[in-house]
Image (cartoon, rainbow, N blue to C red):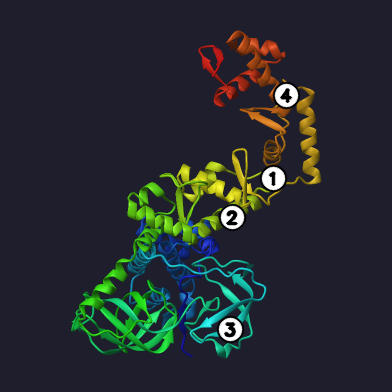
Amino acid sequence: MSLALIFPGQGSQAVGMGRALAISDARAAAVFATADEVLGFPLSGFMTEGPEDELTATKNAQPAILAHSVAVLRVVEDELGPVAFAAGHSLGEFSAHVAAGTLSYEDALAAVHLRGELMFRADQERPGTMAAVLGLSDDEVEALPAGVRARIRGLQTHGQQVDLAPPGRRTAVNLTGLAPADLHRGMVLAHPGALRTTRSVDVRLRAVPYLTRPVRHNLTVTLHTGAAEVEGRLLLLDAPEVRPGDEAWAQVRLVAPVCALRGDHFVIRDPNDTLGGGLIVDTDAPRHRRFDTEAIARLETLARGSPEELLLAAIALAEPATAGTVASDDETRAALATLTEAGDVIALGEGALTDDSALYTRAGLDAATESVRDALASYHAATPLRPGMPREELRGRLRLEPGAFDQLMARLTRDGLVAERGSAVGLASHSPALTAQQEAAASAFLAALRAKPFSPPTDQAPEGDVLAYLEGAGEVVRTGGVIFAAEAYRELVERIETHLRAHETITLAQARDMFGTSRKYVQALLEHLDAQHITRRVGDLHVLR
């Protein structure tokens, strides 16, 4: 019996991948260590710890899946015996080459990382979108190009039932009203009437540089776009042939309809080779005369894009972009107004646009919102008694500048997704609640603080999450190593401010005598007031700011 190995492609990544494998087997750990060394960044950290948005980025997901595939291979290859065939889905072809010995693991890592980087840049330069399907009960969709209709019963991502399928996420769709025979590879789901099919596409074609012959006019080819694969005829429009590495305008006339959009990527092949690829510039295109200067000029204009399209691409590349950076002249400001009015670009701030207004594409804001939701949901699951994640920690995870972060939080607060609680941000739906045992511990601690309000015990604090809960609820205030009941803290601050307004200065000894307490308590309090910019220290004195 012959043995065949099939390796997975992009979409099979998940945070935690490889963790148990590396712990249990030194061969797998060595594979992951080699990946970190070759790539020059901690890929294994993204694989085992996340965050998910870093791991799912194409430039990281592709080498991660390769590394995991090779790690599994190294662990089991001695037990498998001779392998007759190795294959892979898309990216998995590189893993198959490593298994077959036709490519070294180190070279495959470098190639896959470059492949992911180029795909990532291409997506940034020509951002694509996916329509999320909402309102799942009886939501009607159309499967193109066949045009058959069905209703959605549910969505699943990584085995989990979800209500929203965001762009770029591998998703299973449960459809009713269709038989398996009604569907085939390359079909696209869309709301009825949202997309159209085509049998001809105008393209900017670049021949692959390693071809041993030029690409000829009127050649029978197979066009690949998305998951579709359709036979057609290649008509060169501005060149008699396309030499390896060169570019040309072309039209592909197809024998069967395909669902494609302007800006989609494509690849063409003949029975023996990959010939080239590029971008689809126009769909449902009329037949052109060869070397027609007007037709070529129109295609070049389409490729450059309208001011709105160019601005939308610039915002997608930098988002969140600032209005002053991307719209600095009358033409781009007019284009920005058109995009915001159409809802393709969202300005986070309220009121009129300013140079500091943060801008997102519609898909970009959806992705940012999902990142906030995921980060806060994970934080609440790990620390259910805390009111939310510290603002700066969340900002760091999102990698946002302070101004853009503030505008995003304000927007999501208005939308009812998040709530700002002091210096923390949490999901608006999150409501911390103590268990009966924790409630008893919290009550006992508060009673001890109130029994000696200005000299509270410093060795009876409850566990960290309970204490954080009391802080978030406004029951206690932490001042360095001393915790005061909130009402005692307010009295302390009020009496010190009253003294300073009357006498301008206060010493540590005066504060100690005022409250009949010891040095350690007033020292912690005064240092806290300095840090809160209520007072400031001048030598041994403290004065109001």
Residue 350 position, x and y percent, is 52, 46
Q: Give the residue type at disc 4.
A: Ala
Which class describes the residues within 10 Å of circle 2: few (<14), some (14-19), or many (20+)?
A: some
Foreground label between 1 and 3: 3
The residue that mark 2 highlights is: 373
Q: Give the residue type at disc 1.
A: Leu
Q: At x 77% / y 42%, what residue is drawn?
A: 438
Estimate the spatial distance between the alpha carbons at disc 1 and disc 3, rounded to whole Å.
47 Å
Q: Give the residue type at disc 2.
A: Arg
The residue that mark 4 highlights is: 488
Residue 41 position, x and y percent, is 39, 55
Estimate the spatial distance between the alpha carbons at disc 2 and disc 1, rounded to whole Å.
18 Å
Q: Is residue 79 left or right of residue 280?
A: right
Element type at mark 2: helix
The residue that mark 1 highlights is: 385
Foreground label between 2 and 1: 2
Q: At x 53% / y 44%, what residue is drawn?
A: 393
Residue 341 position, x and y percent, is 47, 58
The reply to whether the C-beta atoms of the residues labelled 3 and 4 are less than 8 Å apart is: no
Q: Give the residue type at disc 3.
A: Arg
Element type at mark 4: helix
Estimate the spatial distance between the alpha carbons at disc 3 and disc 4, rounded to whole Å.
67 Å
Does residue 519 appear in this view? Answer: no
For marks 1 and 4, the one nearer the N-term is 1
